[in-house]
Amino acid sequence: MASAQHPGSPRWTGHGARCTAGPQQEASAAGPDLLPPGPEGDSDSGGSPNPNSSMTTRELQEYWRNEKGCWKPVKLLFEVASARIEERKVSKFVMYQIVVIQTGSFDSTKAVLERRYSDFQTLQKSLLKTFREEIEDVAFPKKHLVGNFTPGMILERQLAFKGYLSQLYAIRCVRRSREFIDFLTRPELKEAFGCLRAGQYTKALDILMHVVPLLEKLTGHCPGLVVPALCAALVCHRELERPLEAFAAGERALERVQAREGHRYYAPLLDAMIRLAYALGKDFVSLQVRLEASQLRKPTPHGFTLKELAVREYL
């Protein structure tokens, strides 16, 4: 039977002693755990439990009951609410404010982000490489040599970009693509992980608080994609000595990895949660049993801690 030694004891054999830093743990330059471009990324199976998981039959049945009862397709509306002209020493451009709202109910976590014309243009070029046929009828506003900063042109672009994003979102394989999700979340996630690396944990949490709800709405088909951001929130709360908030973020992350033992965050996350649970006087034994059962099936030497893994994202 698995040992219930607590974290910090001489016989503690958690992740820090066993998990390896294999190639699959290295963060991708394109961001963490994102789907590969193209139709292959349009899969509903990304959040399914591993058939070799440590979950019992009863736990698996409960998992699927929860999945069927809780998962509902999320539909989003895109508004380009406003625009502003930004002038720098060597450039001048228009920043468009995009508001993303979930339909069907009051959305208290609507996302507000800013992108410039060149960001939209980069998205269009990347989508054409993989989805040329799928987006052949989607109109993209052309760039003009003059008049780009007139009120009339800016308003015309606002309406055009609203239609452009709405049309892209209507195409299933496009809205689930790495390119589309990156366009809406990558700049903010990159900034948040940069703040984490710099020890600016409060600023990182502020950014994550705004981008994670949008990321969750965009990745309902594959919940594991939001795990790195939730783990980053855990790390930030823990470094700010907020163990309850850290544990809450960790619970949300564990819900999304479930029995996916192959997920590179699985073991480091369990190890961090065991230590938090012990410090908070919560049940750490069941978490430790899950980790040890996983390690028994696939013994591995020392690897990254959760923080070491998080700081490697979005480099």
Image: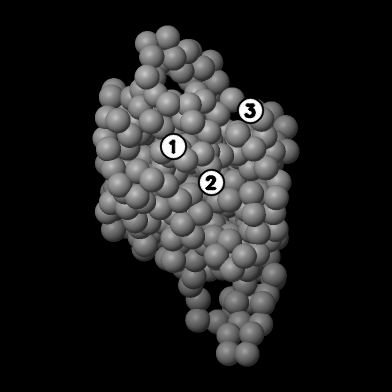
Residue shown at 37%/56% (left/top)? 27
For marks 2 and 3 on the same chain, the one whose residue lies earlier in the sequence: 2
Which kind of residue does numbered mark 3 sit on? Answer: Lys
Residue that carries the numbered disc 2 in the rendered image: 231
The crowd level at tag 2 (other Cα within 10 Å; few <14, some 14-19, many 20+) is many
Residue that carries the numbered disc 1 in the rendered image: 11
Q: Position of residue 115 (x, y in %)?
A: 57, 64
Dot 1 falls on a residue whose secondary structure is: loop
Q: Position of residue 227 (x, y in %)?
A: 49, 42
Quadrant in the picture for residue 225: top left
Q: CA distance from mark 1 to mark 2?
A: 26 Å
Q: Is residue 260 left or right of residue 151?
A: left
Q: Which mark is residue 137?
A: none
Q: Is residue 248 left or right of residue 31?
A: right
Residue that carries the numbered disc 3 in the rendered image: 282
Dot 2 falls on a residue whose secondary structure is: helix
